[in-house]
Image (cartoon, rainbow, N blue to C red):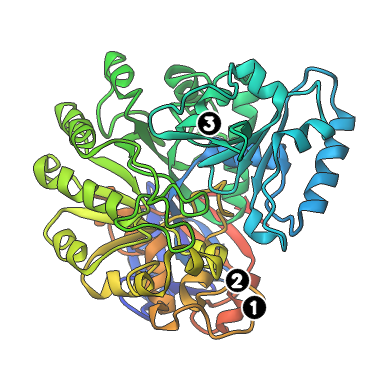
Amino acid sequence: MGTLWTGGTIYTMTEESATVDAIYVEDSIIKMTGCEEEIRRKFDKKITREINLEGNVMYPGFVDSHLHMIGHGEKLLRLDLSEETSSEVMRKRLEDKAKEMKNGDWIIGEGWNENNFPDRKIFHREELDEIASDQPMMLSRICRHALLANSKALELAGINDYTPDPPGGVIVRDDDGKATGYLLDNAQDLVQRIVPVKSEEDLQYALKTGVQDLLRLGLVGGHTEDLHYHGGFRRTFDAFRTVIDGENIKFRTHLLVHNQVVGVMHEDGWNYGEGTEYVKFDAMKIFADGALGGRTALLSHPYNDAPDTSGVAMYDLHELKSLVQKARFFKLPVVIHTIGDLALEYAIESIEGYPPPDGLRDRLVHAQVARPDLIGRLQKLPVVLDIQPQFVASDFPWVIERLGEDRMKYSFAWKTLLDEGLHCAGGSDAPIESPDPLLGIHAAVTRKKAGETHEGYYPEQKLSVYEAISLYTKGSAYVIGKENERGQIAEGFTADFTVLDRDLFAVSEDDIPEARVKMTVVDDEVMYQQ
């Protein structure tokens, strides 16, 4: 009838440092927490299964509040360039990959970041042609707001030196006016849409690969945006329903719905909160701007290291308001990608004009650059800030060059946001960053990469361990209105748990990434065990 969990430290996250000896679960719901003796006395005849934690440490199940699950699976299966620290090594890996491929096959790579290279090199298409002239090549930058393409890929996409920039995108050109193969934001679509579509089997395999890895990392769920890609809404949704079937795989999945496919969702009869037991439709996704790496995040003042640009608006203010109004027509909250402060301002003004339906919350993803006046306006709105702590580890110190010191006080300022009473949830934006929540918690607490020895970038913005873990538990539950059902270990809450081999509250901050996942539990069922 029910399960008794004992034999370890159990952090409830109801308040800081709160622990219990044992919990009793019945029908996937926590019925009691507290002293093992008292639980045994009360539920003696109902306890049909006992699980001993063997000295390990249990937390409420970690949830990634913003990622791309199929993209994460693809990254695991594709050429991963995210760890390369020089352009020479990146070139060598591309040459090796080209030798493995047949003529005409696409060479697809993920995650390169010129800021990790001493020479800050961004390859020109002619250099990529030297590596592969007959094989089309598409290499997504770490931020996924830019890509590199060789001449074969540009030819297939119909891009030449005279192709105009699409709305919300840039075809980068050299001093001679030639297209370099570097495409920013919406210009990427010109190449991405001609890449051969995966078969349904390959799509499901990529998703399954991603989900299994997320469970291995201790995640019990994720809020993911995939439905606009991978061959369209219907086949992508079908892949989620097939893979996360509630029998072989349980994973609490909330689908963010791109504004360009939300109409299809409603044509098929789906509404907010509907779906299957483990795959639910969530907010409508809108991109307001790009990213800081490619200088396409929309700023209110020019970039410090490129005064000729302030970034790229995916939509002007009127268009953005119209999209938010569209979401309200479908009775949906919105999730708006906002990295620059002007994009954040546009998003706030749009939400002020068209508030979410009663009881629902909007979310602003990233919120990396803010201003004091915008924080004041955010405090008056039913919004959650969906932050990615690992961006501090990845974007510093080069981001200081982009923004300049004057803007840094309110940039990546997670502690300020929390202290101002704003609700925050924690995600990775995988495959942009690793979806490992321990890396996110470590970055939030230390403001540096694992292994670095300095005091952290802008240490006044460090979070406590409790605040950092709350992002991935209580915060991820709050953003979807499930704060009374998930994110804590308490009576009436869902039995989703992450079990680690050590106490994150007791180890040194630098040892947090060294923790190992012992079990990932969804609905009182072990979905991963080391």
Question: Which residue occupies 67% across, 76% down?
Answer: 451
- Residue 356 vs residue 339, the one in the foreground: 339
- Residue 447 vs residue 436, the one in the foreground: 447
- Residue 269 vertical placement versus 499 (above, below): above
Residue at the disc numbered 3:
188
Residue at the disc numbered 1:
452
Question: Which residue occupies 81% across, 25% down?
Answer: 133
Labelled disc at residue 326: none
Q: Is residue 184 left or right of residue 417?
A: right
Between tags 1 and 3, which lies in front? 3
Question: Which residue occupies 28% across, 69% down?
Answer: 417
Element marked by disc 2: loop
Residue at the disc numbered 2:
449
- Coordinates of residue 66 in the picture (x, y in percent): 42, 48
- Name the kind of residue labelled 1 in the image: Glu
Question: Which one is earlier in the sequence, the residue at label 1 or at label 3?
Answer: 3
Q: Quadrant of residue 492?
A: bottom left
Element marked by disc 1: loop
**Is residue 397 visible in this depiction of the protein?**
yes
